[in-house]
Amino acid sequence: MIHPSRIVIKLGTQVVVEQPSGLPALERLGAIVNDIAQLKSKGHEVILVSSGAVGMGRQALQLNGPLELPQKQACAAVGQSRLMALYDQLCTTVGMTIAQVLVTSQDFTNRTAYLNLKNSCEELLALGTLPIFNENDVVSVAGIRDTGAQTEMKSFDDNDKLSALVAGKLSATTLVILTNVDGVYTDNPNNNPNAERIARIETLPHLTSISCTGTSALGRGGMASKLEAAKIAALCGVTTVITSAMRPSPVSAALSGSYGTTIAMTQASSTSLSGRERWFGVSSGFCGIVTIDMQARHSLERGARSLLPVGVTKVEGDFSIGDVISIVDESGEEVGRGLSGQKASSLRKVAGMRTTQARELLGDDEKDEVVHRDNLVVFAEVREEEATHGA
């Protein structure tokens, strides 16, 4: 039995909206709201991350078929007010006050904006409200935009990732992802009758070894995005439960550990990130990409040193000192993230050089290290620790 004190609940479009009608799933949402009220009455703090604005807007505007980006943004603009009105109506009947929190990826990427968001949410929770997060789809643009001058993440891509960032950065203990299937399976249960539900995942290698594809008819996410969200949450020390919303008291059922898939790292395989490390290590955005060679990757994963210019083979974006950068190997796999000690323009000049050579070309305010060890989160360190413990 999990005993959380702060719970983040994520509802996908397929939970919020009935298919194929596109109408709100009133009975299902009512059951979830009642469940949340019960949890709050027992002293738990609850944050809701809800999709559904685009789906409700599509139904209101009577749009069918694939949507272009401007149409999706229009649907979001129409549907968001309807979605919040629905939650307000449902929550008022059980004595809860809701608070709308619309965010973009920049609210997590920019340190000042992130701290303002965190402080506002802490106050909302202290006042007993139910904060309801959603991405501001009206202004967000999916994917990475590379203008040659800068590279930045403009969207969370789906609310699964948003829910993980909210859980990790607001110090939740548990993330409950409610969907239309009862957890993670060894294979697609719709195609393979012998597929078995995985009750518990306790190591990152187990989590990352699971392969699944597909998306829902109305939403952007699929099981793959939910597992990626669980990985982000795990790096922040948050337990994730992926389970079905199609049962009575689905959140309480998920917290009981009897249903769905619980993803909780064992003590030997867990990592503890500070609040500052959570910001840049699992940030939803970054200002540039630095490619490193395999020798540099191995050095970082052994935890022995900072990232130095000699290991850098490519620099993308226009970042400044202190900006979040993504570190990838030459295959494109992300190794980690950190705060840059150098400007992008300077790093392009010194990439591949030894520190003594590079120092002559760097400014007085720039560090010898591309990323100092204290400002670096390496994702594979958790896997290394698990191997050491024989996990």
Image: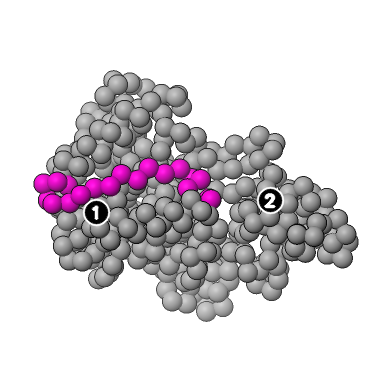
Residue 209 in view here: no
Left or right: 130, with 210 as reference point: left
Query: Does the magenta segment cover residue 92?
Result: yes
- Gap in angstroms between the C-alphas marked 1 and 2: 38 Å
Residue closer to the observer: 244 or 6: 6
Q: Is residue 325 magenta?
A: no
Looking at the image, is 182 positioned above or below residue 140? below
Pointer 1 residue: 129
| Mark 2 lies on residue | 320
- SS for tag 2? loop
What residue span does the magenta drawing correspond to? 91-110
The residue type indicated by label 2 comes to: Ser
Q: Is residue 327 left or right of residue 139?
A: right
Please state which amino acid type lies under the numbered disc 1.
Thr
**Height in image: 274 above or below 336?**
below
Q: Residue 261 lies in what quarter of the image?
A: bottom left
Crowding at label 1, few (<14), some or many (≥20) Cα neighbours within 10 Å? some
Measuring from the top left, give residue 197's x and y in whole percent. 32, 58
Name which quarter of the figure residue 55 lies in: top left
